[in-house]
Image (cartoon, grey):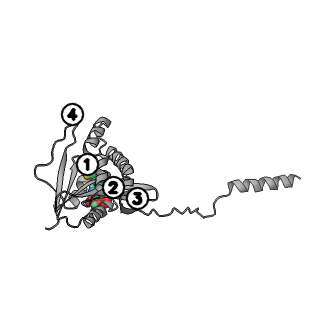
Amino acid sequence: MKKLIALVTLSVANLYTSEPQGKTCKIETPPKTLALSQATHADVPIIFTFLKSMWSQTYDWLSPDALNCIFHEWNNIKQFEELVESDNGVLLQLKDETGLHGIATGKLKDKNTLYIGNLYLDQSCQRQKWGTNIIAELKNKLPQAQRLEAIVQMGNKPGEEFFKKHGFTTKAGYPKKFVIEKGNERFDYARVEKNLTD
Ligand SMILES: CC(C)(COP(=O)(O)OP(=O)(O)OC[C@H]1O[C@@H](n2cnc3c(N)ncnc32)[C@H](O)[C@@H]1OP(=O)(O)O)[C@@H](O)C(=O)NCCC(=O)NCCS
């Protein structure tokens, strides 16, 4: 009987303390299928919410009040709704099955100038050439453009470096001051440009 108890105790102990025998568990995560597409009217509300959240991450030196004030001064949902209906503009979105990861707008300001606005990618998609692909896609969609233009906030190093790397230079007369009425916060910005015909 003693022998039997000892045997049972040993096998139970083995069950719970057995070490892996050089094998590892492999959990397959399906690859994300990130893709750029043109947004529609129905996509606008979620894009606007994403944009606001990207503003607070990107301009984290601003107080919440200042951020709110400038955000609504520079952006409104109607502009996005008009853009998706327009022949002279495009709203791009970068999505996978988990949701939205990036956006950008392109609009022909005049016959020759493509204005690139609201280029924001969340952290999971930064520095993987999506920004570069987005510029190429905007040029594809609006091939009549001979110049590119964008706005960069002073202090946003990733934005400044990105446009510099793509050959944009600061337009004459910039940076400009943007002073928020209440308080002393500032949000200075530069218009940057690139000629496509050189
Ligand atoms: C800035 C932003 C649009 C760039 O897009 P991206 O897909 O990350 O950039 P890419 O991978 O296409 O980079 C192209 C080049 O731009 C420069 N660059 C991009 N991000 C940079 C960063 N954080 N710091 C320094 N240089 C950077 C590099 O020269 C880079 O080339 P490299 O990676 O071979 O060195 C993106 O990182 C982003 O959305 N950031 C947060 C929001 C923001 O700042 N938006 C811009 C508003 S003006």
Q: Amino acid at mark 1?
A: Asn
Mark 2 vs mark 3, CA separation in Å:
9 Å
Mark 4 vs mark 1, CA separation in Å:
21 Å
Quarter where residue 108 is shown: bottom left
Q: Secondary structure at mark 2?
A: strand
Q: Amino acid at mark 3?
A: Lys
Q: Which residue is mark 2?
A: 103
Q: Secondary structure at mark 4?
A: loop
Above or below, 10 relative to 52? below
CB of mark 1 near ligand 1 (< 8 Å): yes
Mark 3 vs mark 4, CA separation in Å:
37 Å
Mark 1 and mark 3 in contact (Cβ < 8 Å)?
no
Q: Which residue is mark 3?
A: 95
Mark 3 and mark 2 in contact (Cβ < 8 Å)?
no
Label 4: how many residues lie within 10 Å, few (<14), some (14-19) or many (20+)?
Answer: few
The C terminus - image quarter: bottom left
Select label 3 or label 1 by which is in front. 3
Q: Which residue is mark 1?
A: 156
